[in-house]
Amino acid sequence: MAKTNKTAWTEADVSGFVNSYVENIEKKADSFRLIELMSEWSGFEPKMWGPSIIGFGSYHYKYASGHEGDAPVIGFSPRKAEFSLYIYSPTEESEQILSSLGKFKMSKACIYIKKLSDIDIPILERLCRESIAYVNEHHECACHDQSVKDKP
């Protein structure tokens, strides 16, 4: 039996999610600002992925193990403690500019920030655009056809 990804595109309302889930006023404002910025940079409208990820665009991945699925090209989640930014791709450009981002923590492919004022927004844009280009080059991606704006 095939394993179903729990982080799948949903019809949930993005603004409704932010307004009901995010209690801190500054984090709520930062969430709406990230939505504006990521929409502009990606060319896609925000969509909910799973219960708490706001994603932009979509791509299909398939691992050597055979596991495959769909994921947002870029995205974020306004978690209680900090934002989780899903914007990083393993490129030379990303490695070079990451140290200029500002105050953050990082796991394998996720960048964690407390608030937008802790980071350099032009560097964030470069990281997002680099990630979009990486996904476009390495996966079946909705970013191949920017005319498909209504798809996740």
Image (cartoon, helix red, strand yellow):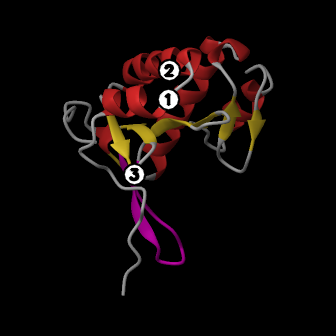
State the SS at label 1. Answer: loop
Residue lying at the far bottom of the rendered structure = 1
- Report the amino acid beneath label 2: Lys
N-terminal label among 2 and 3: 2
Q: Residue at x 77, y 36 (%)?
A: 105
Q: Is residue 42 magenta?
A: no
- How many other residues sit within 10 Å of disc 1, few (<14), some (14-19) or many (≥20)? some
* Mark 1 and mark 3 residues within 8 Å of each other at the beta carbon: no
Residue bearing mark 1:
22
Residue 80 coordinates in the image, percent (x, y): 61, 36
- How many other residues sit within 10 Å of disc 3, few (<14), some (14-19) or many (≥20)? some
- How many other residues sit within 10 Å of disc 2, few (<14), some (14-19) or many (≥20)? some
N-terminal label among 1 and 2: 1
Q: Is residue 59 magenta?
A: yes
Residue bearing mark 3:
50
State the SS at label 2. Answer: helix
- Report the amino acid beneath label 1: Val
Q: In what quadrant of the picture does the C terminus appear?
A: top left
In the image, the segment drawn in magenta is 58-71
Q: CA distance from mark 1 to mark 2?
A: 6 Å
Q: Residue at x 32, y 37 (%)?
A: 47
Q: CA distance from mark 1 to mark 3?
A: 16 Å
Q: Could you say which is closer to the camera, residue 110 or residue 126?
A: 110
* Mark 2 and mark 3 residues within 8 Å of each other at the beta carbon: no
Q: CA distance from mark 2 to mark 3?
A: 19 Å
N-terminal label among 1 and 3: 1
